[in-house]
């Protein structure tokens, strides 16, 4: 079968352009094999990274049909099937007898060096910023090994599977709008350090990751990092676990992000859903303690009043008692899981 590859090409200081290449392929052919053939048979100037060809090194990360992935892992059949599902969900018609197209582009959120090769230095710098290794004091154990039980080691397995391919970083919309956010890859590794029984810097790490811009509260919970991770590390889940550790150590007065989470849960417990009249006042103005926050609500409040969209009353949702009992059961379970 023939497939047309639309590859976004760009030099470091040049404008991007799309170049087309047509190949005869089989359904099982990987995207990396296709790129190799284009380079070897049609255009030796095409630049991309590769190494292991076996989903181990993470070198061949790129955007394939709009999604960050490993070129050595994805094949023609899988991509065509995914594109067909997207067309069906969007209500688009069948492509008919047209030659299928594959769009290949470099990873996002990173500077372009050439074609599909990006500068990974910001990625590595943000990883270094969270100090994702066992503390020096934790390693200072003379004349013996630092042993872990199988249960302790098993807590690190999921985060340890990360191959640093950059797919999650590429898709992170929080990183796209906030250059201070360290990214999902770094915070997934940060949770590995928190969960490691050999480390002795838990409290200082949690304070570091509690930063509202660089740390866990910068995450927008879009789930894209979980969706594209080729190793099922689920970075957003790891970020959530760090948030849980922080929330357990602070009350609602500690910061706006912490107050946001605690007030949200409190209001849902009360009414089954959020009373928006209270939510903004309790979170942004800190129940009238934060005058600057209160004043920031004024423009939105005036617009809502003019549009007559300010509810005068609040009606709890049906099943509020059941919602409350579920939340309390989860909270009780979490409390039981905490080490004494």
Image (tube, rainbow, N blue to C red):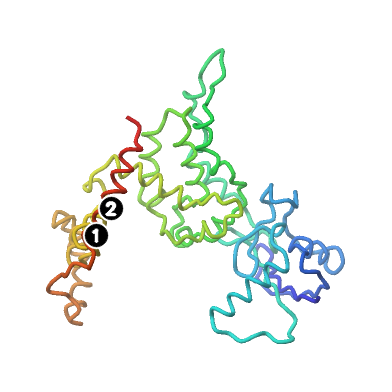
Q: Which quadrant: the N terminus?
A: bottom right
Provide residue 177's location: percent of width, then percent of height: 44, 62
Query: Is residue 284 in sight in this rendering?
Result: no
Query: Is residue 82 in sight in this rendering?
Result: yes
Mark 1 nearby-residue class (10 Å; few <14, some 14–19, many ≥20): some
Residue designated by label 2: 327
On screen, residue 290 above or below 204: below
On screen, residue 286 above or below 210: below
Q: Which quadrant: the C terminus?
A: top left
Q: First in sequence: mark 2 or mark 1?
A: 1
Secondary element at image label 2: helix
Residue designated by label 1: 268
On screen, residue 226 above or below 21: above
Secondary element at image label 1: helix
Q: Are marks 2 and 1 in contact (CB under 8 Å)?
A: yes
Q: Which residue is found at the position 22% from the left and 48% from the top?
A: 252
Provide residue 178's location: percent of width, then percent of height: 43, 58
Q: Which mark is residue 40?
A: none
Provide residue 99's location: percent of width, then percent of height: 75, 81
Q: Which residue is found at the position 52% from the left and 41% from the top?
A: 128
Q: Nearer the viewer, residue 57 or 154?
A: 154
Q: Which residue is found at the position 35% from the left and 32% from the top?
A: 339
Total count of labels: 2
Mark 2 nearby-residue class (10 Å; few <14, some 14–19, many ≥20): some
Of all residues shown, which one is farthest toward the top? Answer: 143
Mark 2 and mark 1: span between their CA atoms?
9 Å
Q: Which residue is found at the position 80% from the left and 61% from the top?
A: 36
């Amino acid at each position: 079968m023939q497939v047309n590859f639309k590859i976004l090409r760009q030099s470091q200081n040049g404008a991007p352009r799309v170049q087309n290449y047509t190949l005869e392929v089989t359904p099982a052919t990987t995207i990396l094999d296709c790129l190799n053939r284009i380079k070897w048979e049609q255009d030796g100037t095409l630049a991309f990274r590769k190494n292991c060809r076996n989903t181990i090194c993470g070198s061949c990360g790129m955007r394939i049909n709009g999604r960050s992935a490993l070129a050595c892992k994805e094949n023609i059949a899988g991509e065509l099937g995914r594109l067909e599902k997207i067309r069906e969900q969007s209500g688009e018609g069948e492509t008919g007898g047209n030659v299928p197209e594959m769009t290949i582009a470099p990873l996002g959120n990173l500077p372009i060096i050439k074609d599909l090769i990006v500068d990974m230095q910001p990625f590595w710098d943000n990883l270094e910023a969270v100090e994702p290794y066992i503390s020096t004091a934790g390693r200072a154990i003379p004349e013996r090994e630092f042993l872990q039980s199988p249960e302790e080691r098993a807590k690190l397995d999921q985060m340890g599977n990360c191959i640093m391919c950059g797919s999650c970083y590429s898709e992170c919309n929080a990183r796209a709008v906030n250059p201070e956010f360290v990214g999902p890859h770094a915070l997934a590794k940060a949770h590995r350090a928190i969960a490691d029984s050999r480390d002795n810097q838990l409290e200082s790490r949690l304070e570091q990751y509690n930063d509202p811009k660089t740390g866990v509260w910068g995450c927008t919970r879009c789930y894209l990092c979980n969706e594209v991770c080729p190793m099922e590390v689920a970075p957003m889940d790891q970020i959530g676990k760090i948030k849980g550790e922080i929330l357990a150590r602070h009350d609602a007065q500690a910061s706006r992000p912490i107050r946001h989470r605690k007030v949200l849960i409190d209001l849902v417990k009360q009414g089954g859903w959020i009373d928006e009249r209270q939510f903004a006042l309790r979170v942004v103005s800190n129940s009238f303690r934060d005058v600057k926050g209160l004043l920031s609500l004024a423009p939105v409040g005036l617009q809502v009043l003019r549009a007559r969209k300010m509810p005068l009353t609040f009606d709890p949702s049906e099943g509020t008692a059941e919602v409350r009992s579920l939340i309390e059961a989860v909270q009780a379970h979490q409390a039981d899981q905490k080490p004494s």
